[in-house]
Amino acid sequence: MFSHIAPQIAYNDTDVGPIQGHTPQGNTTILPDFGLSPYAYVFYATEAEYACSVLINIDRLNNVFQTKNRVIVLVKPTISSEYLSLFTAQNATVIPYEPPPLYDNDTPYYADVLLKLVGFRLHQYIPSLKRVLILDSDQIILQSLDHVFWLPSVDLAAPRAYWQGSFGFTSAFLLVTLSDRLWDRIELALQNITDDTFDMDLLNKMFGETTMVLPGDYCTLNSEWETNSIPKWWQGFEPPRDPSWKPPRKLPPTPDPPPIEIPPSLKGPLSTNNTSDISHNDQVLLSEYLNATARREEKIQAARDAVEQVHKEQVWKHEVKERGRRLSTTLEEVYKDVKVMHYTALGKPWQRYLEEVKKARPDAHPLFAKGFEVWRTKAAELCPWGEGEYVI
């Protein structure tokens, strides 16, 4: 089975990204079209760590959920051949593609994020594809997703970005019904992208009123288990808090700095609030006195703000502990409903050893650390760097 596609990178006039490869005769290159499924999971990888995460999710799709649908990986051409071989060993189709540029490439974290939007044109490479599910790689698939391909046929379906209140949908999970009409819209938008616009902004602006919005359990943040919080999409009952519970208030003393002495010659004018007729020397003394008094007030306010911040941190810590005790079982039930969990809290799983996670978040639900452990354990097994890099 041939699945590894050699890079064929060329740029069009708009510098949006590569056009399709061409044969010497000028015909459009069509990638090998194997398999019966008209559906595909699509990932994209621009760095080694993300490629590792893609590999983990492909392994889960194939070996945990036994999907019969295709898997496609869009890769930045700099991804190592070692990863390309590992992808193809998992029967994934690999398509090298230079990421479309952002308006301002001075934002390194988002520099290559628009590569995911190339997923909207995959039917031009593999004509039998009808629908694709484009997934960010910094998340982990917890349940089979094959059923989403049978949702009503709309241009785009995506989960609500429930963590942003009423703001639109997330671009971490995009179910796309492929068409030239839809890709033409995406391509035009990429050619005219504006400053401070990234994938999620662009898609919400284009499809905010027409996207079929999926429940938040299709993309849930792992921060819910970091802070022992129930996500807004969950429809169960939250155990009530003991009404007598109150967080302790232990505040350090904040003695005020000594008062500023009023120069003797100014006591009279200041007591009557009449300083208009004082001498030049007293005007200098008055200015120094007022400046010193202002600095003292600033120090007092800064000390009070510091105490208040300590208090807020104390309250938050005890709040997390209380919710952890009260909602432990509920959070386990919530976890069972999650289809895809997105790593947002405390960095990505390749950035933290398990003991670091536990030490940094001692009051988090055990499932928070478990999310890191599951990823790192599988990374040590599957990824080229192996156990030396992804030690638990």
Image (cartoon, grey):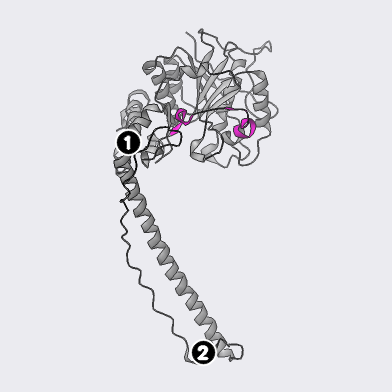
Coordinates of residue 290 in the picture (x, y in percent): 52, 79
Marks 2,1: beta carbons within 8 A: no
Closest to the observer, 183 or 160? 160
Coordinates of residue 135 in the picture (x, y in percent): 49, 26
Residue 266, compared with residue 324, is above or below; it is below
Rounded to the nearest whole Å, what is the CA distance between mark 2 and mark 1?
A: 64 Å
The image quarter containing residue 10 is top right
Closest to the observer, 178 or 137? 178
The image quarter containing residue 50 is top left
Q: Return the residue at label 1.
A: 369
- Identified by mark 1, the residue type is Ala
Q: Return the residue at label 2.
A: 266
Instruction: Check disc 2 and report its element: helix, strand or loop.
Output: helix
194 in the magenta segment? no
Instruction: Check disc 1 and report its element: helix, strand or loop.
Output: helix
Earlier sequence position, callout 2 versus callout 1: 2
* Residues shaded magenta: 203-220
Please say whether residue 152 is visible from this viewpoint. yes
Coordinates of residue 375 in the picture (x, y in percent): 36, 29
Coordinates of residue 332 in the picture (x, y in percent): 33, 32
